[in-house]
Image (cartoon, rainbow, N blue to C red):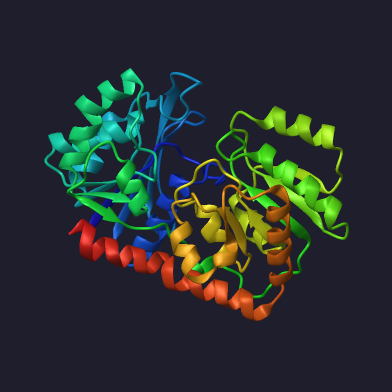
Amino acid sequence: MRILQVVSKYSPTGVIGGPYTVAITLCNELARMGYHVTLLSQSENQVEISRKDSSFNFLILKSKLLSKKFNPSSLIPISGYFSIFREVYQSKVVHIHFARDFLPIIVAVMCRLAFKPYVLQCHGMVVDDERLSIKILDKFVVKPLLRNARKVLVLTFREMERMPLELKNGQIIGNGISLADIQQNMLHKEFEVIFLGRLNWVKCPLKYIEVIQQYNLVYRDAFTSLICGPDGGQLNLVKNQLLAVGDPKILYLGALDKSSVYSTLQRSKVLFMPSERENFPIALIESMANGTPILIFNHFDISPILLESFPEMVIDVTATCDEIIHRLNHLSNKSTDTSYVNKIKSFVAEKFDIAGICSQLISETYL
């Protein structure tokens, strides 16, 4: 079976994260299972490439960003449309990592024209929006594409409820990672708390700095804490706040290359995600797969799943700074407990192993 995976923006270094990380993980596992897989994406920074990886094909199109304000939504291929249609036509099913972006919409429309079954995976990016331009786009483009998809994949029940229409073809499938990539030997802890995510207002990096500053005042023997992630509009604010705080034990490392994400997480005691809103962040699974506990707010869509086994990793969004830092310290102390670390890893293996997710896709979604 030929499977085409489509994602808006190519990120060979892995700094974009999110849908690209999910797409590349799915491609690797599906190819390992013996399926013919192609990843279709686009990039501003290189000419069109078409090559075979050790396990699957890449088709990366040269593209142009029409508006810096809408990145990657306004990224559009300069050429290669025949190549896209050929891949669509030759594939048994097309799996589109979908948002209101040009490339996913173009491919979905081509699927309709070629009478080719397609699956849309929305990653929490398609929700009701009150802007007039989005309402018009949804009415004439997005909603028809959602209705006619073989399946619309959502991460949680909460995401399903936020979709701009009632989904009769909705299917809940969570994110997953390849457990084969995880180093089993525990690395020595070098860092206290880590922030991993794009530096934008939704991820709340400024709140993270505020909390960790207080944490270091209360727990003076704490290790250095890290801020890791690419700029999402708040990099300058983060740098200015770090200068104003003047705490040498809070460091900004920039965007981590995918080859160093797992080792950095494993060397950290706790991952703290103070986001304004989150659905099913892949960084959360990556952290737990490496045995590193996490702390999230109870408004995260994934929080009900965590509450079943790790209630200490979920805190009420109304919690005070003191309550947050004491919970972080509790998790920090547990992060070196071998039995606790093994419990976390077993939880991830049971619920978020990419092999099980791909088997579900093949048996329940693609066919």
Viewer-side residue, 341 vs 50:
341
Residue at the extreme bottom of the image, as rendered: 339
Instruction: Give the quadrant of residue 283.
Output: bottom right
How many numbered marks have been drawn onto this rendered protein structure?
0
Q: Which residue is drawn at 72% across and 34% down?
A: 238
Horizontal side, residue 169 vs residue 293: left or right: left
Viewer-side residue, 317 vs 254:
317
Q: Which residue is drawn at 68% across and 65% down?
A: 331
In which quadrant of the rendered image does the C terminus lie? bottom left
Horizontal side, residue 186 vs residue 63: left or right: right
Horizontal side, residue 211 vs residue 303: left or right: right
Viewer-side residue, 354 vs 114:
354
Mark yes or no: residue 117 visible. Answer: yes
Mark yes or no: residue 121 visible. Answer: no
Q: Which residue is drawn at 56% across and 77% down?
A: 343
Q: Residue at x 66, y 49 (%)?
A: 195
Give how far across and how far down residue 115 sits, in percent: 11, 41
Give how far across and how far down residue 168 sits, in percent: 17, 48
In which quadrant of the rendered image does the N terminus lie? bottom left
